[in-house]
Structures are given as structure tokens and as C-alpha cells.
Image: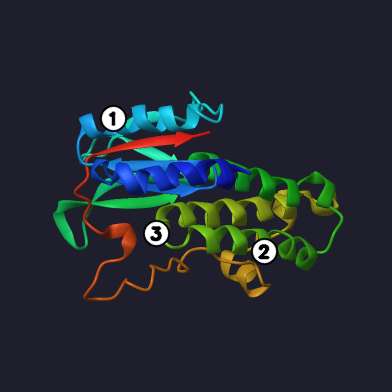
Amino acid sequence: MANIYLNKLDRIRAARCEQLGVLVRYADDFVAMCRTESQAKEALRRIGLVMSRPGLTLHPAKTKLVDLRPGKESFVFLGCTIRKKRSIQRKPGTYFVQRWPSPKATKRLRERVRELTGRRQSGKDVKQIVAKPTPVLRGWGNYFRPGNADREFNKMDYFVVRSLRRWQYRRGGQRVTKRKPFTGDQLYGMGLHKLMGTVKYPAQATSRRSSVSRVRENRTHGLKGGV
């Protein structure tokens, strides 16, 4: 339904507003990337006008102007935090647009892992417990791995291993001192999915060409919006 209503927005932008910047839209979630603050404000005004015709309005909590100049602000789009950061390995003095899992996306996965390794699972076999979060982790990792998620993946791996160790301590009502905790290698050997090391840049990412997530971004302002 959102695509039907917002198809007109796409057509009007392509015909009349291309000079204001680039519009990236997925269903009712979109970002308008502009070179200047004045262009971003004008894009916001025109988008509001176009959407008001079929009776739609921009979501007040999701719509904001963001300054993407180095060291300024960030925004969340499709579960990813978007921000300009320096690339220490490539060019320490140059800022690149990077993306990684948002705090909300990370929180949801942690809650799911807690659910799958909680007290209700205490009486099950360790291989059964390891098998439960594995497809969840693999799906989450496949979605977020095209980007700069190394740090978040590393922290999530640590959290998952720690959660499984807590399950181990509770299992059978035995004391912590009577059971040697699993190591990460042991759990990965049982089939637990490891996120770290799975980050993959898009096809453009080669030694001679930067990935989409690290292309140097000239635009300095963006409009984050949603219906």
C-alpha cells in the first residue's frame, strides 16, 4: 500500500526535484540526501506537500534534518546507524559514510537470545540449546554484514557465549564451581554461529575500489523521514 501511495512521490522527485538531491526509499521509510541545509529544508517542504495531497503526513518522530558533516550527527535507516567516521586503516584524515546495526536492532537480538537461553530451557541438552539461536544469529548477521559491523558483531558474539554459559550454570541445579564453563571454541564446534569474521562488503569492495559503505560522501545534509 505504501508503494502505491508513494509512487507519486518518486515520479515527482524524478521530474521536478532531482536538483535537490537523491531520494532513497524502501516502502514508507526513506532518506533524502542533499548537499546543503537549504536544499534539505526545501526537500522537506516539497515532500510534505506531495504527501498531503492523498491525505498522508510525515511521522513527526521519524522525520528530522540530520547534519552528516564529519563528527556531527547520525541517523537510523532500515535498522542501520548511518554516520561519517574516519577510516584509520585507509586514510586516517578522511571521513567515510559507515553503517552498523542500530541500538534498537541490537537490543532486539539480545532479547531473543535471552529468551532462547533462559530458565525455561534449563533441562535441555546443550546441542539443542546451541541450535536454537544459530539460525537467528545467521539471519541477523546476513542482513547487517554488508557494512562496518565488526565491532557490534564482536560484542554480540561475546554476549551469546556468556548467555550460554549462564544456561550451563543453571542446568540441573548444579553449582557454578562443579561445572567448567564452555569456551567459545567449544560452542562454535557444536554448531553455534559466529558473527565475527562474516562481514562482507558489496561487490564493489576490492583492493582497488571502496565498498558502497565507505565511498567518500560529499553531501553534508540529509532528511530522514517516514510515513
Q: How is the image coloured?
A: rainbow
- Residue linked to disc 3: 147
Q: Nearer the viewer, mark 3 or mark 1?
A: 1
**Please, is residue 73 above or below residue 82 in the view?**
above
Q: Residue at x 35, y 49 (%)?
A: 14
How dense is the environment of label 1, judged by Cα within 10 Å: few (below 14), some, or many (20 and up)?
A: some
Tell me the number on the disc at residue 42: 1
State the residue lying farthest toward the left: 93
Between the residue at mark 3 and the residue at mark 1, the CA separation in whole angstroms equals: 30 Å
N-term-proximal mark, 3 vs 2 = 2
Instruction: Spot the residue most to the top.
Output: 60
Residue to which mark 2 is pinned: 134
State the residue at coordinates (31%, 65%): 211
Label 3 or label 1, whichever comes before in sequence order: 1
Is 72 placed above or below 99 here?
above
Q: Nearer the viewer, residue 78 or 10?
A: 10
Residue visible at 67% across and 50% down in the picture: 113
Please state which of residues 107 and 213 is positioned toward the viewer in this rendering: 213
Quadrant of residue 69 in the image?
A: top left
Asked whether the viewer can see residue 58, the reply is: no
Q: Is residue 222 above or below residue 189?
A: above
Q: CA distance from mark 2 to mark 1?
A: 46 Å
Q: What number of labels is visible?
A: 3
Residue 183 vs residue 38, the one in the foreground:
38
**Residue 146 appears in the figure:** yes
Q: Residue at x 44, y 35 (%)?
A: 225
Give the quadrant of the N terminus.
top right
Q: Amino acid at mark 3?
A: Gly
Residue 108 lies, in percent from the top left, at: 61, 43
Q: Secondary structure at mark 1?
A: helix
Q: Nearer the viewer, mark 2 or mark 1?
A: 1
